[in-house]
Image (tube, grey):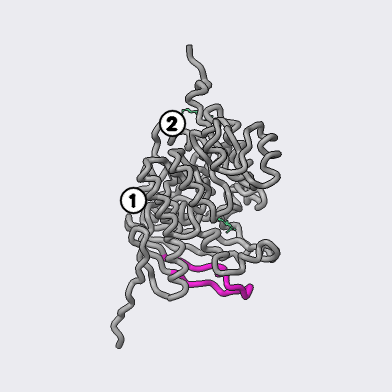
Amino acid sequence: MTTLTPSSSSKLNIAIIGGGLIGPRHAKSILSNPNTSLIALVDPAPHGAALASSLQTAHYASLSLLLSSPHRPDGAIICTPNNTHVPLSLELIAAGIPVLVEKPIATRIEEGLGLIEAAKREGVSLLVGHHRRFNPYLLAAKKVLDEGSSGKVIAVQGTWCLKKPDEYFNGIGAWRRGESGGVVLINLIHEVDLLQYLLGKIVLVSALETAKTRGFEAEEGAAILLRFQSGVVGTFILSDSVPSPWNFESGTGENPTIPHVEKGEGAGGFYRIMGMEGSLSVPDSKRWSNEGWNEVLTTEDLEVDRAKVPFDLQVQHFYEVVREGKEPSCTGEQALSAMVVCEAVKRSMASGEAMEIDGFEIKEINSSRSRI
Ligand SMILES: *[C@@H]1O[C@H](CO)[C@@H](O)[C@H](O)[C@H]1NC(C)=O
Ligand SMILES: *[C@@H]1O[C@H](CO)[C@@H](O)[C@H](O)[C@H]1NC(C)=O
């Protein structure tokens, strides 16, 4: 007898820790996948119990109550405030439960390192929810790069430019005026993760800050030079003070609050990846090539499965990591590495010097230039 639905013992019973904005989104993906089921919701806030009952799942006011209950999960998704990501992940890992923690993995690099070490020591899977890796446009680009039809990649050009409204920095958003509320830690971090996913580790950055137009402490953007371990070099323009179609959100339509710039209107997309046999533009998803500069350029449309939902693919991926031993797509190391690159960009902006990134360490490239 064959069946398309796995037996209940092989289903992955997942608990969601945190019932804020993203928790219900994860719940939807868990409930729609026959491989997974929602075993409990943990949230101490008054709306937690109501949310759990609307999702027809058990409710616990704390993680320790869940862990001492009969609803022991096979995996947990942590989507709580950023500063609780590390302590909650550590508690689950100590209990031997695989974790998918929302980004950022930690608020401080040292804490993130401690978490990665704990997961390794206990032999428990740790994934970080950089779900843009599962975006269909990104998956299409990744597939072509991995197949190698564009040849050796030489360079990349990226852009994330969008104008944030004044309200974003007011009221409960007022913290974004401060040092940790700038565009590097909030937005560039996703770009860095995607670029490293596509092209490997970044080992050097140098950044020039854009003009400050709001008068806040937070940076608004930068022009960034990149070198990857593979030898690929790149440039990236980042700004949250200009309107433009060249950013991940406008280009992919994945954030429902930011209107999608439909295919073709993005004029070259937010990434251009130049290889010896052809160049790719993302998300217009074209591969450009010719045999020589006298030949007409031909374009090939990459196959993009626009029906795929990143959160659904990510939950299925979590299942495959835990049940089938698949390598995590965003490991703790990879997520922390994006944080380190962002930190290096900020240091470079402040000092005017290039920064070398060696593992999780940042070294200023000593500018002992000879003077004349
Ligand atoms: C359930 O898991 C199996 C095995 O990994 C996979 O082939 C199938 O596509 C999954 N179902 C969904 C809805 O993702
Ligand atoms: C938490 O981190 C995310 C980035 O992953 C950021 O968008 C969000 O603004 C952060 N929240 C706080 C309160 O720092």
In this view, which residue lies farthest toward the bottom? 372
Answer with mark 2 or mark 1, whichever residue precedes in sequence. Answer: 1
In the depicted view, which residue is nearer to us: 149 or 131?
131
Badge number at residue 144? none
- The amino acid pointed to by label 2 is Arg
In the image, residue 21 sits, relative to residue 361, either above or below, namely: above
Q: Residue at x 42, y 51 (%)?
A: 115
Q: Is residue 66 above or below residue 112?
A: above
Task: Say left or right for 301 vs 226.
Answer: right
Q: For the magenta stretch, what is the residue range? A: 207-225
Could you give the CA–CA distance between mark 2 and mark 1, rounded to whole angstroms? 35 Å
- Say which residue appears at 57% left-offset and 47% top-offset: 79
Q: Residues within 10 Å of mark 2 (few under 14, many from 20)?
A: some
Residue type beneath disc 1: Lys
Task: Residue at 64% x, 46% y: name it.
Answer: 44
Q: Mark 2 vs ligand 1: CB under 8 Å? A: yes
- Mark 2–mark 1 CB contact (< 8 Å): no
Residue 114 vertical placement versus 324 (above, below): below
- Label 2, secondary structure: give it: helix
Q: Quadrant of ligand 2?
A: bottom right
- SS of the residue under disc 1: loop
Q: Quadrant of residue 156?
A: bottom left
Nearest the camera: 263 or 229?
A: 229
- Does residue 198 show up? no
State the residue position of label 2. Answer: 323
**How far across and how far down the image is residue 20, in percent?**
64, 47
Q: Is residue 340 left or right of residue 359?
A: right
Residue 321 percent location from the top left of the image: 43, 36
Circle 1 is placed at which residue position? 152
Where in the figure is residue 326, as x and y percent of width and height? 40, 36
Task: Name the residue rendered at 33%, 57% in the picture.
Answer: 229
Residue nearest the viewer, comparing 138 with 87: 87
